Image (cartoon, grey):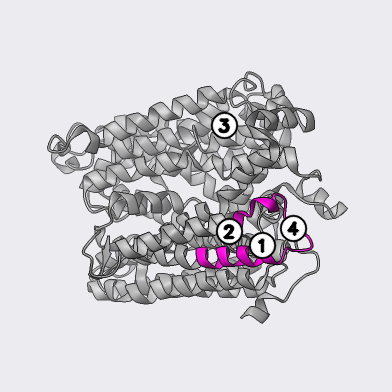
Amino acid sequence: MKTGGSLSIWFFIGISLLVNGVLICGSGVYEFFHPPQQPVVLYHLHANIWWGAILAAIGAAYCIYFAPGEGRV
Amino acid sequence: MLLALASLDSSRLVHLSTVDFFIIVFYFVLVLAIGFYLKERSNTGEDFFMAGREMTAWIAGLSFLSANLGALELMGWAGAAYQYGILAAHWYWIGAIPAMLFLALVMMPFYYISKTHSVPGYLKLRFGEASRTLSSVSFALMTVLMSGINMYSMALVLKIVLGWNINFSILVSSATVAVYVSLGGLRSAIFNEVLQFILIWAGALLIPILGLIDAGGWSNLKTRIATNASSEYTHLWSTLGSSANNPMGIHWTGIVFGLGAIISFGYWTTDFLVVQRVLSAKDLRAAKMAPIIGAGFKMMVPFIVILPGLLALAVLPMKLTGEAQAIATGGHSYNEVLPLMLARYCGPGLLGLGITALIAGFMSGMAGNVSAFTTVWTYDIYRALIKKDATDQHYVSMGRWATVVGVIISVGTAYLVMDFKSIMDYVQALFSFFIAPLFGTVILGMLWKRATPAGGFWGLLAGTLSSIGMWAWVKIDPSALRYIALSPNARDMAENMYRALWSWIVCVLVTIVISLLTKPRSDAELNGLVYGITEIPTESYVTVFHRPWFWAALVGVLFVVVNVVFW
């Protein structure tokens, strides 16, 4: 759905997922090289790295697909 | 802001890192940006109160579901799953899916074709001004009070979980909601609800995934729950033959007829908080598809709410208790299940996203209440009773002010509840008084052309008064519960189910009797409002895969399957 002719709600969601994904993945990578003293359960799975990467990838795809001026709904 | 957020209490459940704070602050910035961006699109009444009636089925459907998926809902039902086991899933399946499909296929055409802007607005068209006034005044009052209670509860949660100052939590979240709803109206509320929906899944989905790995899969989870609690905790129906055989103390008739037939239908088909989202759809087919899409996702919500509660029974090292005992012993209460599971599996970043999901859920629930209040106040009370012939611009301006005033009343309620906690129980009970009878009135109005204005009004009033009467009876004499819930083993949860059932029956009987004694309206007057008189547009121009009934049937089959699998 368009809003005022330019930005779709999905574009905002793309931004949200992209920014959050990058921050989460980045903190996961930092933790990988600087392991915490009190790790969470299943720390060895490094969930924040791959979950953050998934969110960032989905967010980037949404940002591109629903970018302003693309005419998609 | 970061310093204020960090005015912490040493007893908090989780500790946030810098990246977690950034994720939370980014959320606040984004929702405010959306509000400012949408301001230019909210200049007419149709834009501000109905989001221009141009939402797609997906947007309306996700918003419809999201308005109900508040933080308290998530945390409360995760706690209920820990306390009662998988029985809590009834509130997501039989307590929602049939009603949502019924709304889509049977009721939506009348709401949509009548072009009403609200549920009280439909009552005005069908039964006259008296029914609308009764329903709109009670709805507006209860909605804004409920918003305040939610605000207080969430501030309390943020204090317990994060150690945040209660005043700070109330101030920041209420001011944010007031800004983005007063600027962008329903459109802004809907946008943020869809954003919240995505954030909830992004923030909460990892818990069941990691939890199942931690527990060793579903079979091992069931074995561990049987050891730590009882094997009854993983059965949905097989323990409901007697109130004495299940942790909830409820009989299957209470679940099927009280929850599944009355409370659920009342809430999902007549509570304007959720119905308003569907009314914003761009056409009738989108309006019918929206609740079906919502139902499909609703069926999956137990994966991120009920399953974490069950996982906590298996993997948490400590035993959770009720609120009072937790305070007395310094332990953790059932309602802390989700934050505890978040803290168990989520490191920096993920924790911030999980907490953001809870905050987003809370703010979205509050925005839903406030935007519904604004519409009902402006159209069904102010325009109907106070100023009938003002300009559209005047009503939009009134809507913006009503949003701000609604938020201020909510804040006042939040502080009132802080000092007099029993008010919370009373207001929640008051809200429940109107839902079941309202469903009786609306459904008779839509399906029975003989129902008259007098029948509708007196039926609604009698149903509401009978509900209040039953509630007061049990308050004065708790042993009366055995008569209302039909069992000496019944507990609080069963009372709500049966009280709803009886009040609905009273409403329907009184409506029928008085309608038969009074003069009905002509068919011409009821065109567009009642089944059998209204011509429903055909959907033969679209393929089977685009027809609402096809997707409703698919969701219906999945609903049966999940109930059988977890029998």
Amino acid residing under circle 1: Phe
Q: Is residue B109 above or below residue B72?
A: above
Tell me if B288 is positioned left or right of B416 in this view.
left
Q: State the CA–CA distance, disc 4 to disc 1.
A: 11 Å
Q: Is residue B126 above or below residue A12?
A: above
Point out residue B379 in the picture as x, y percentages from the top left corner. Answer: 32, 62
Q: Quadrant of the N terminus of chain A?
A: bottom left
The answer to whether residue B162 is visible is yes
Task: Tell me which residue sits at (54%, 37%) in the image.
Answer: B91
Tell me if B507 is positioned left or right of A52 in this view.
left
Disc 2: which chain?
A: A
What is the number of the mark on residue A32? 1
Q: Please tell me whether mark 2 or mark 3 is closer to you in this view.
A: 2
Label 2 element class: helix
Disc 1: which chain?
A: A
* Disc with the residue nearer the chain's start (4 vs 2): 4
Discs 4 and 3 carry the same chain letter? no
Of all residues, the one furthest to the front in this rendering is A33
The answer to whether residue B158 is visible is no
Q: State the CA–CA distance, disc 2 to disc 3.
A: 49 Å
Q: Tell me the magenta residue range.
A: A20-48
Pointer 3 residue: B498
Task: Tell me which residue sits at (73%, 32%) in the image.
Answer: B225
Point out residue B525 in the picture as x, y percentages from the top left corner. Answer: 17, 43
What is the number of the mark on residue A39? 4
Discs 2 and 3 carry the same chain letter? no
Amino acid residing under circle 4: Pro
Judge whether residue A31 is colored magenta. Answer: yes
* Disc with the residue nearer the chain's start (1 vs 2): 1
Q: Are marks 1 and 3 in contact (CB under 8 Å)?
A: no
Disc 4: which chain?
A: A
Q: Please tell me whether mark 4 or mark 3 is closer to you in this view.
A: 4
